[in-house]
Image (cartoon, rainbow, N blue to C red):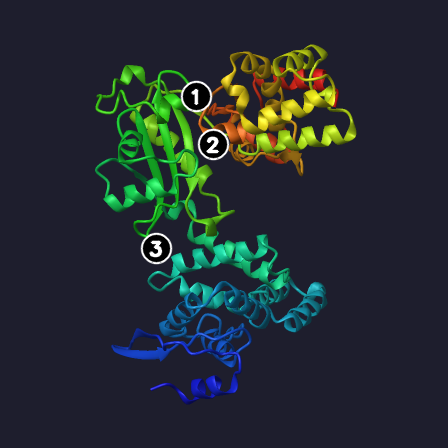
Amino acid sequence: MISQRLIFAFRSSTRCWRHPIAFVEARKRGGWRCFSTPVCSRGSPVMEEILARVVAPLPTYETRDKAPPPPESNSLEFMHFYKSLDMEDKLSLLTKLSQDFGVDHKSVSELAVKLLDTQIRDLATILQAEDRLRYSLIPRYRQLLSHISRVEGGVKFLVDLRTDLLEIISSKASDSPQIRDLNSTLKSLLSEWFSVGLLKLERITWQSPCDILQKISQYEAVHPVRNWTDLKRRVGPYRRCYAFTHAAMPGEPLVVLHVALTEEISNNIQGIVREFSTLDAEEDVNKINAAVFYSISSTQAGLQGVELGNYLIKRVVRELQSEFPHMCQFSSLSPIPGFTSWLQGLLNQCRKEGRGLELLSEQEWREVEQATDCAPGMAAMDALRKLIGTGEWMRSERLSLLLEPVLMRLCAWYLYGEKRRGYALNPVANFHLQNGATMWRLNWHADTSPRGMANSCGIMVNYRYFLSETSHNSALYLQNKVITASEQVLSLVSQFQKNSKL
């Protein structure tokens, strides 16, 4: 039967609607207990009642290690209720959870005053006051999150819940500081639960379970898998595919890394993902001198900011060194998302300010005018913007030769010179530079797919991992915001500064 409290809640709320009562069963002391979780709209008594029931009071400081855990059914009830809501009502629930079940600010203030008063006391008294204050800063809802993580499917639920929080924050659906604090608390918990020591490295092969292979295909975000033959190629000879998994999310790859085993560091992606000549070949160890990381994909949006990719690359390097002791060349072959849109924005800005002609040399502008049969000045700039926007220049060998030095130096500046808070603006560059890689080589016509042309005019970049230098490079970048780059990259940057006069 439905409890009298829920019947009253249905009758007293004018904003609830009919919905089939869903029953969830939870094992408790050898028996089964049923409870109902009707779906209600924002601010309804049902929502308030469920939160009041499932979010247990924070134990007192003295009983923090002795308080019995709440029943598992509380976690299951919250999970079921949350899943039944639409996004608008999820926002309402999360807002209420973060505002009404967070930190007791009055208690924190009182304990902070007491801590100041203890500064003249002995060290043991000061440490105990600090510990009490630290305990009071724990949000009440943190206990609910921790207990949810212990039930079956709970960790995956929390990862998905954080996906919702990130969407709420990025879409500005809420500017509540409590929502941001809830997101920060959940991120901190997920960082603990997904620490590298709890992750398992798995090599994915054609003999791996079919559902894992299917997920590897679905999650591929850099170079989409076209069919099963394509997937078989990517886990076959001269290729390696690795994934981190977690015991709490079985069968779910968290971050996936694809590696090509080559003689030299690759300068284009076509030979890696579109070449099938070695599909059934036996690997010749004498032809394997380099490992090229050509795709790394995080599969769970809710783990954003939880460092996984960095550790995966380091683990894979150790794995490959064990398999191929002679291997000493490790590099990425990375896309440059955002370059084309940045360039179009730069051209638009320069045109408005009447200084666009500074981007190219006088000789280059004359060649653009001749190749496009347009008048000098702004007409030539408009023609260049159109060429870059449509990718039509790729069809002309003349235009391709003309634009190569222009686009290469502009791309080098975008990667090396454009910053956000002092770090590389491009997210892929920022990721590899944080890992200690060197910005090693820009590659022309490296990705001629429609996506590659639209994102970066077909240019790709190698970030080279010199293993003896990665720690030093990482520290230089993170602490002093210094980018370690090769002579080729620095030369292109110098050409940009000389020609562009910006």
Residue displayed at 58% across by 62% down: 179
Q: What percent of the width, then of the height, locates residue 64? A: 49, 71
Using the numbered discs, state the Cα–Cα distance from disc 3 to disc 1 in whole angstroms: 38 Å
Residue marked by disc 3: 248
Residues 147 and 22: in front is 22
Q: What percent of the width, then of the height, locates residue 465? A: 47, 25
Residues 52 and 367: in front is 367
Using the numbered discs, state the Cα–Cα distance from disc 3 to disc 2 in whole angstroms: 35 Å
User: Is disc 3 in contact with disc 1, using a CB cutoff of under 8 Å?
Assistant: no
Residue displayed at 51% across by 32% down: 432
Using the numbered discs, state the Cα–Cα distance from disc 1 to disc 2 in whole angstroms: 14 Å
State the count of labels: 3
Name the front one of labels 3 and 2: 2
Look at the numbered disc 2 and give the secondary structure of its residue. Answer: helix
Q: Quadrant of residue 309?
A: top left
Residues 475 and 282: in front is 282
> Sequence order check: which comes first, mark 3 or mark 2?
3
Q: What percent of the width, then of the height, locates residue 214? A: 30, 43
